[in-house]
Amino acid sequence: MGDGLIIRDLSKVYYDVYAGQHVAAVDRVSLQIATGEFVSILGPSGCGKTTLLNIVAGFIPPTHGEITLNGRRIQGPGPDRGVVFQSFALFPWKTVLDNVAFGLKMRGMPRDDRDRIAREYIALVGLAGSESRFPHELSGGMQQRVGVARVLANDPELMLMDEPFASVDAQTRMTLQEELTRIWEARQPTILFVTHDVEEAVFLANRVIVLSARPGRIRETLQVDLPRPRAWRDLVEDAAYKALVARVLSLVRTTPS
């Protein structure tokens, strides 16, 4: 299974052409995510959460440091990592089935095999019966389910999620959060989940990593030992859940002395 994701002494510095100076987005971040673990990362706006995720995805290079996934150094995008974006990022001219099967098609999998796998994951995210529909025929929440199914169908070693539920209404967001915990419990993919929502981070994860204000450094790591399966109706008044949320909020809102 490998040793999961290991980030060692990672930093990213940009040159801000408007300010005429270099700006550190992420500074000396080191962390490990075990295979099958669900980790949320959050922090103040502009703290480098998405920058960190984009480096792990291989979309941008680090200025310093090293990232390995199951012993292999990350030096660019690859099929071992799947990304679910905040925007739905579906092909509007493809059906649900063809959107979910797209990555499998690019890998040369025969049509019958990729359709079978795509249908399995479409059912897993609760969209069985929607295989022939197009994205414009789906609600925002349904489109994001398709995005999740597309990543899962490719069986990546690491699933990267960048505020994937930020574009939907509050009720749909809660439903999607519960669906994601159900999927994780069923399949246990390794997930790195970026969010600005404290309650979401605590509800979903096994572990929450709080970054400081820019440049982003790991301020604190909190273990989430809440029982699973998780549902909002059970946790909304749970004392342990509320205490964790309060602790994370205090870390996000205060500046280290």
Image (tube, grey):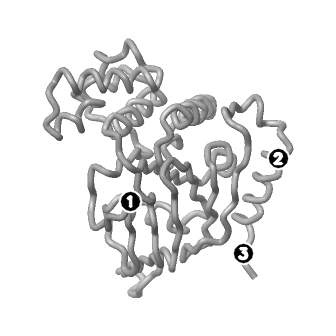
User: Type of residue at label 1?
Assistant: Asn
Q: Residues within 10 Å of mark 2 (few under 14, many from 20)?
A: few
Instruction: Name the front one of labels 3 and 1.
Output: 1
| Viewer-nearest residue: 17 or 227 | 227
Locate residue 118: give its quadrant. top left
User: Type of residue at label 2?
Assistant: Ala
Residue position marked by numbered label 3 in the rendering? 255
> Mark 2 or 1 closer to N-term?
1
Residue at horizontal 22%, vertical 28%?
93
| Viewer-nearest residue: 122 or 88 | 122
> Mark 3 or 2 closer to N-term?
2
Q: Could you tell whether 106 is left or right of 212 in the image?
A: left
As drawn, the label of residue 240 is: 2
> Mark 3 or 1 closer to N-term?
1
Instruction: Name the front one of labels 2 and 1.
Output: 1
As drawn, the label of residue 70 is: 1
User: Type of residue at label 3?
Assistant: Thr
